[in-house]
Amino acid sequence: MPRDESIERTLYRPQYFDRIVAWGGGDAINNVIRYLGPGLQLISFDPKSSISMIGPEAFKSDAALKPDFESVKSTHQALVACLVSGTGTCDSQIAAFASAQQALTTEKYKVWEGLFKGAPNASKATTFLSQMQQLEQQKHAMFQQAFGSSPSGDSPDAATTPVE
């Protein structure tokens, strides 16, 4: 597909992204370098590198997750309606929402478990986990620098929580 310079100039801005990941030889990397500046970093891989990415499709294809997502959505709507009504206690809606979230989380971790069991290279999967934990620690440190505390009281084990 030919590149469109007007689209690249519009998209490759720090207000939209903080990093650009590029694969390829010198020409491909030099093309991206033109757009770098303060607030926009390049992560580059030479053409011999390959990578697998786990996208939302990994979760959407799991049949057990669809009813869990729907349950979380409907119980959340019921909880919000109860809270907004201000007519009394919302204990049953809170419990239903918490239960739905727990079921969804359990199913998501089953999907992650299956993905890592099928990983072709266990040592790279372990390295990946270590890198994710380091990124989570960096995020935590940046929030503390900026706001004086972590976002929503992250717990120490939040570093192992997969990101969708």
Image (tube, rainbow, N blue to C red):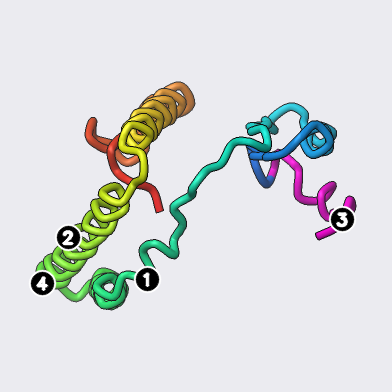
Q: Nearer the viewer, mark 1 or mark 2?
A: 1
Residue at screen point 24% across, 51% down: 113
Q: Which residues are magenta?
A: 1-15
- Under circle 4, the secondary element is helix
User: Does 14 sit left or right of 137 as displayed?
Assistant: right
Could you classify mark 2 by the number of other residues whose Cα lies within 10 Å: few (under 14), some (14-19), or many (20 or more)? some
**Residue behind mark 2:** 102
The CA span between labels 1 and 2 is 19 Å
Q: Nearer the viewer, residue 3 or 35?
A: 3
- Under circle 1, the secondary element is loop
**Residue behind mark 1:** 61
Query: Of the residues under marks 1 and 2, which one precedes in the sequence?
Result: 1
Query: Of the residues under marks 2 and 3, which one precedes in the sequence?
Result: 3
Query: Of the residues under marks 4 and 1, which one precedes in the sequence?
Result: 1
| Image location (x, y in percent) of residue 87 | 19, 75
Could you classify mark 4 by the number of other residues whose Cα lies within 10 Å: few (under 14), some (14-19), or many (20 or more)? few
Q: Nearer the viewer, residue 123 or 15?
A: 123
| Image location (x, y in percent) of residue 19 | 63, 37
The CA span between labels 2 and 4 is 15 Å
Name which residue type carries label 2: Gln
Place residue 47 in its image quadrant.
top right
The CA span between labels 4 and 1 is 31 Å
Could you classify mark 1 by the number of other residues whose Cα lies within 10 Å: few (under 14), some (14-19), or many (20 or more)? few
Name which residue type carries label 1: Ser
Residue 4: which numbered mark, if any? 3
Name which residue type carries label 3: Asp
**Residue behind mark 4:** 92
